Amino acid sequence: MARMTSSARPLLNRRLAEFGTTIFAEMSALAAGTGSINLGQGFPDTDGPEEIREAAVRALRDGRGNQYPPGPGIPELRAAVAAHQERRYGLSYDPDTEVLVTAGATEAIAAALLALLEPGDEVIALEPYYDSYAASIALAGGTRVPVTLRPEDAAPAPDGTPHRRFRLDLDELRDAVTDRTRLLLLNTPHNPTGTVLTRAELTEIARLAVERDLLVVTDEVYEHLVFDDAEHIPLATLPGMRERTVTIGSAGKTFSFTGWKVGWVTAPPALVGAVRSAKQFLTYVASGPFQYAVAEALALPDSYFEEFRADMLRKRDVLAAGLTDAGFSVFRPQGTYFITTDIRPLGESDGFAFCRALPERAGVVAIPNAVFYDHRDAGAPFVRFAFCKRTDVLEEAARRLKAAW
Ligand code: PMP
Ligand code: GLN
């Protein structure tokens, strides 16, 4: 205690000092405090399939997973993850050596970066990037190198509504690689922009990774949420990529149980082994009974995944129409359950100030995209709304937003 008070040294270490409290906690607290509709933090307001919830109850009652499960995850879940990758993408992974269960995708990301980076290694991430990327890179002593996705006009909606999208500039990506680059940290479908990388883009990324001998960590937690003519293509399916790619998935998004925190990594044995080395000292294991339930969830018939996607697509269209009607410029997402908007048509330009005032002004909570940028100015006018909510909630939010301007 004496040491703490007599020293001028701050308590929080330098690696974490810049991060503060996550925007999701801040904005969800604001939503609760003001009784606002929370379209900020991305969690569904309806739980996933009843049969899967029951599977968790059964596991708990039967005493499966109530004590430490095996470090790499229960064999049933590892087998289910491998079967899912094979069934959906034709990717073959050995459940014993090439699959690792984690405490959500968040731990998978942290463990991968802690395992694979030496201090000073550069990591290229697509900006705007999910907030835990920056913190995990920092914890690992790495240096983040953002490559900014740029807004551009996109094909209009079937009803003629103009739309925009965020695009990766492949030349910028190529230019960002240096002799110190160790790893590309990708995310497709991309939070918060809703961009889904195309086969042509992924092919170029793969070529670059092979040419410069880079590792790739690819966060594909929204793999089942792709819309219109977009297709989710796992990077590991492209030539030369399986051996250098750590792919991350999560039950939270696909099965609407974000509180269960069951995620997974698929990669060749050496990469899985490395990630496991870090993971074992983070949580060691997590979510015992839920692992059994998620094993069942991954084996659900294709109709589950199709209906889930169709339901989210309807919600996307409800919110996109509502936001457009309220005066926002909308980036129609091809994936994820987020819509990024541009607030400048409303006469606003500072997303932070806008989001802080929004609960009082409209009774709605959203996320300022600037928090996902190193180049804060580039993200200033963009604001993200989540649409993984009941349709009546989305409609009410849209009504409130329209009335506020
Ligand atoms: N990656 C992305 C892109 C996310 O949006 C999220 C949060 N939902 C996560 C990872 C974290 O996933 P989990 O809840 O499984 O830790
Ligand atoms: N991934 C969710 C989002 O982007 C939030 C998860 C969290 O709060 N850490 O909104």
Image: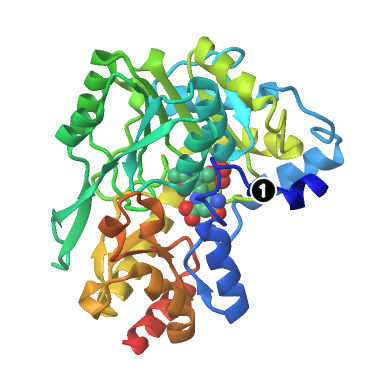
Between 282 and 64, the residue placed more toward the observer is 282
Residue tagged 1: 11
Position in image of residue 235 (x %, y %): 34, 26
Count residues near mark 1 (Cα–Cα under 10 Å), then give few for <14, some for 14-19, many for 20+: few
Between 282 and 264, the residue placed more toward the observer is 282
Q: Count of labels shown?
A: 1
Q: In the drawing, does residue 232 fall left or right of residue 255?
A: left
- The residue positioned 83% from the left and 36% from the top of the image is 66
State the scheme by which the image is colored.
rainbow
Q: In the drawing, does residue 59 fall left or right of residue 155?
A: right
Instruction: Examine the rendered structure and indicate whether residue 148 appears above or below residue 323.
Output: above
Confirm whether residue 265 shows in the render. Answer: yes
Position in image of residue 388 (x %, y %): 47, 60
Between 124 and 169, the residue placed more toward the observer is 124
Position in image of residue 328 (x %, y %): 26, 73
Q: Quadrant of residue 329?
A: bottom left
Instruction: Examine the rendered structure and indicate whether residue 12 appears above or below residue 214.
Output: below
